[in-house]
Amino acid sequence: MKSSILSLFLLTSTIAWAQTAAPSVSPTPAPEQLKARGPAAVAQEEPTRVVAVINGQNITAEQALKLLKGMPANELQRFEQTPGGLTSALQQLFMMQHFAELARQQHLEQQDPWKSQLEFYRENLMAQAYIGQVSNSAKPTAADLKSYYDQHPQQFQEAKLSAIFIGFTPPGAAAPAAGTPGARTEDAARTKSDDLVKKLRGGADFVQTAKTESDNKPSAAKGGELGSFSPDKLPKEISDPVFKLKTGEITDPIRESNGFYIFKIDNLNKKTFEQSQEEIVTTLKNEQVRKVLDSNSKQYEIQVQDPNFFNLPGKVGAQTPSLAHPAPGQPKPGK
């Protein structure tokens, strides 16, 4: 009985408390603000934050970022992908600056070969900067992109390919042991490839034929399957005949340096315009750069006056002085 009365009292008291007093709820603590990570993010958030101490010198985020951004992009990316790589990069940059300062104290930049090399690297860097500017200045319009897409339909195709490879021993190469893949002459490989094409076009199963006849054992085990390729991922002598085919068709034998390939189109797709826009922009920018290079290449085409100087085959003209053929009255080197 006492237990029942006690339980009833507790229940009644709880209800009454709930009706007369609102519970005191502690405020939920605000989540800790995520700190910026990475050189660019930290430098933007707090440029004067000290991120390292090197040789007793405080290095701020802004200073470190400026040094890192001076590195070639591919080198910086390599460091970023390695655990602790950015600290190693910064250390190497400071060591480089230290050694460079020691070199300046000895005036090494005014002495050859370093003087000539510094001039070359500067000129090369400036040339690259100009080419980059040419590329960035090319801003194709949406109409340009669509026009290129419509005029180059084959470029945006992607083919799933299978292949049979019939190898041969190239002339001059050591002949493999009899019975091993490729232990045949080029004529024998061509004859076998032609025979296989006839059988395949006559109805033979490509997968089974690849498994039993192909000398490329890894792909043969998969029935000749190679994967998917766009035209730019294949050599021109392969992409041209391959992308003229329809799904299910096979090529004539295509000769490579050590064998013949018979390709089959398993599936043929075309990327949409939307999927291709970024690729087209890059292509049009590269075309603009190529025009500049081609025009300047013609302008600066060299007219050789002394083949000996350039170590070129040919007969040196009798009137052309050189180190090997000095002008009349001048001694040869070493005399």
Image (cartoon, rainbow, N blue to C red):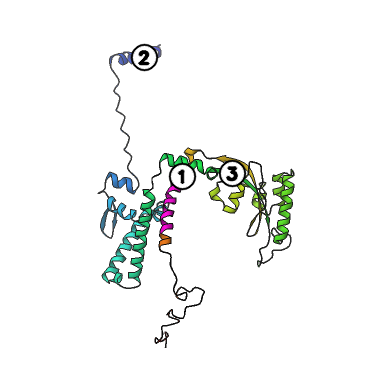
- The extreme bottom residue here reads 335
Find residue 206 and report its horizontal and vertical position in percent: 70, 45
Tag 1 secondary structure: helix
Check residue 103 for magenta coloring: no
Going by the numbered disc 1, the residue's amino acid type is Ile
| Highlighted magenta segment, given as a residue range | 279-295
Q: Is residue 151 left or right of residue 137?
A: right
Tag 2 secondary structure: helix
Question: At 57% across and 40% down in the image, what residue appears?
Answer: 269
| Marks 2/1: CA–CA distance | 75 Å
Foreground mark, 2 or 1, reads 1
Going by the numbered disc 2, the residue's amino acid type is Leu
Mark 2 — residue?
11
| Above-or-below relation of 294 to 283 | below
Q: Which mark is residue 280?
A: 1
Q: Residues within 10 Å of mark 3 (few under 14, many from 20)?
A: many
In the figure, residue 46 lies in which quadrant?
A: top left
Check residue 285 for magenta coloring: yes
Q: Residues within 10 Å of mark 1 (few under 14, many from 20)?
A: some
| Marks 1/3: CA–CA distance | 19 Å
Mark 3 — residue?
159
Tag 3 secondary structure: strand
User: Mark 1 or mark 3, which has the lower sequence index?
Assistant: 3
Find residue 223 and report its horizontal and vertical position in percent: 67, 46
Foreground mark, 3 or 2, reads 3
| Marks 3/2: CA–CA distance | 75 Å
In the figure, residue 67 lies in which quadrant?
A: bottom left
Q: How many marks?
A: 3
